[in-house]
Amino acid sequence: MEKLACGLPALPEVQAPDAGLLGAVLDSFEGMAYRMRIDAHWTVEFVTSGCKALTGYDADAFLRDRVTYEEITHPDDRVRVRDAIFASLEAGRRFCLEYRIVRSDGALRWVEEHGVGVRDALGRYVALEGFVQDVTQRKQAEQALHEAERRYRSIFENAVEGIFQSTPDMGYLAVNPALARMYGYASPEEMVANLRDLDRALYAEPDRRSEFLRQMGEHGQVINFESQVRQRNGNIIWISENARAVRDASGRVQFYEGTVVEITERKMYEARIRYQATHDALTGLPNRNLLYDRLQQAIESARRGGETAAVAFIDLDQFKFINDSLGHQVGDELLKVVTGRLKSCMRASDTIARQGGDEFVLVLRQQKGAESVTGTVRRIIATVAEPWLVNGIRLQVTCSVGISVFPGDGDDAETLLRHADSAMYKAKELGRNSFEYFSAEMNLHATERLETLNSLRQALANDEFVLHYQPKVHLASGAVVGAEALLRWHSPQRGLVSPAQFVPLAEESGLIVDIGEWVLRSACAQNVAWQREGRPTIPISVNLSPRQLTRGDIVEVVRGVLDCTGLAPHFLELEITESVVMRDVDQSLETLRRLKALGVRVSIDDFGTGYSSLNYLKRFPVDTLKIDRSFVSDIAVDQDDAAIVKAIISLAHILNLNVVAEGVENEDQHRFLFDNGCDDVQGFHFGRPLAADAFALACLPPAPAVLPP
């Protein structure tokens, strides 16, 4: 304090105005005017009445030393305030500072003080005169602003999504760390400094930045603006931007600001979903949905260019047998192998699709004519037929192909596919491993096939089915020892329909299950009726379809029919084809054992056409082997067939099985079978299939009545 008094220059003295007038003026201001001594307590010598509102103390409290200004100054601010005032006095200038005071009620207030030092006659600073105002609201507003800025900065720095400010043509003004990391930069500063040409250096798609600017110009914002961009290392990622234009008072764009999120994972997921919706899961080929689209494109292209387009419908021959006998895993591998082979035969402009199951469809674009289509299809047939080794087994799979051509065979996708399908079925009928072009006659055949199926659905309910019976004859005695029930369909519209026409349709559609149960029930009931008429008792044979066996309830069905009709089980023989038995050996073995437990007889039909081994055959609980007619037809002239039939007869007898030869139509066949020890025969040479009444009269005469003595 002495230093202040001795070392400072004197200020000019100013004559004071009238004290009363000055006091009135000062009292009118918000805040308080004061005069304080420069001492340890800032002793108040004068203060206006505004001190009450500001500090909570009236003027008398200060003037009578009940409270000092030093006391109400916040303890944390006292040293700072004193140092600032003394520094200003030493510099010979007015002082202005902000600090906190503690009101009489304990509340804190921010104040702003403006003051000047007062000298005595010797030029020493002895007092301060000044004015103190409450600036609490302003300080709170400033603090709120600072807090908001701090929070914004924290959000900006720590946000997971990218945040940016950019200009239309000068790159980025500011980016946050998340955006820098997203784009592969070590820091925001590095990114701002190096990434300037956004159009070429950032966006991977040409003109994408131009589209961003266009939308900004038209709408002042972009929402979910998705783009592919390059990271610093060249990798491409997907982003989504939301941004707005910030304009000055005149409406000119100052900059853009917005956010960026990476959506690469979402885009990859969406791509996978789209791929799965349009491609086959096993082979990766286009599926039916994409096929229609590609075919329609090929049609439109051919129509515009006056060109030819072709559809080739491919079906693998005997795939179902391979799938059932070797397992679905082998079947799936086969489909993959065939897919690769088909691709090797195709041009980049063509399409190969999997229609479903073992069916494929080729769309051949821009064909010069039938010769080029034929050449491609021949190459496909030859390539598919190449041998294939799986699990040590050498397989050869062939295919049948049907072809339709635009515009001659149809001008829309659905028609071309339908006609190619019809042509494929024709190729199968003509021997498989070949191709056929569509013709109008095929369309008629397909229509008839559909009409037959529709009529077949009503045949059972309309009682249109009948059974005919063909005798089985014991070779040694010539006696009828059994009968096979054969299904016939008397259609009111078509007359007698051949089984070859409707049985495959019934099998495909699933109608064979209900029809087969009807056959089983009717045959058993007929046998019971013959027995009640006193006719010779013989077992009756009924064929079981593959669908009946795979349903899993065949044992329950047979038991129910026997219970319902009252037929003794040993008078029923169930015929199951060799190929059906071999589809699932373990399941077949279990089913056959359960059937045998009922007491019925079991025979293997069409023996020699499948792949059964001795190991399996000796395990199966069967009673009879039926030699397929394909071996019997040429036994008198074909040494190979004769050898096969002899081997089957010998094998059956070694395994204690009965042997039946079917399809015996002449005396030479009869003699050969008799000479080689065949047990029973069946065929036109011994009797054609007959209706029940006719069969009974011809083959089952009633026993003569015994007259009482």
Image: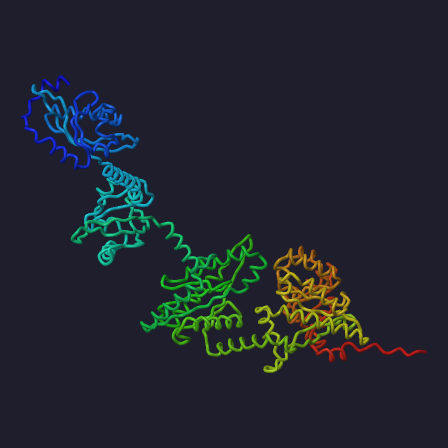
Q: Is residue 112 visible?
A: no
Q: Locate residue 379: give its quadrant.
A: bottom left
Q: Is residue 450 visible?
A: yes
Q: Where does residue 5 sit, x and y in percent of width and height?
A: 11, 19
Q: Quick one: 279 or 217, which is closer to the camera?
A: 217
From the viewer's perspective, tell me whether residue 4 is left or right of residue 54. Answer: left
Relative height, residue 617 to residue 135 (above, below)? below
**Which residue: 23% across, 23% down?**
65
**Which residue: 55% across, 52% down?**
391
Q: Of all residues shown, which one is farthest toward the front? A: 20
**Which residue: 23% across, 38% down?**
138
Q: Where does residue 283 sit, x and y in percent of width and height?
A: 46, 57
Q: Where does residue 659 sit, x and y in percent of width and height?
A: 72, 65
Relative height, residue 377 to residue 238 (above, below)? below
From the viewer's perspective, tell me whether residue 462 is left or right of residue 709. Answer: left
From the viewer's perspective, tell me whether residue 255 is left or right of residue 653. Answer: left
Q: Quick one: 565 or 469, which is closer to the camera?
A: 565
Q: Locate residue 126: give its quadrant.
A: top left
Q: Quick one: 670 or 284, which is closer to the camera?
A: 284
From the viewer's perspective, tell me whether residue 427 is left or right of residue 603. Answer: left
Q: Of all residues shown, which one is farthest toward the right? A: 709
Q: Quadrant of the C terminus?
A: bottom right
Q: Quadrant of the N terminus?
A: top left
Q: Where does residue 421 sit, x and y in percent of width and height?
A: 48, 71
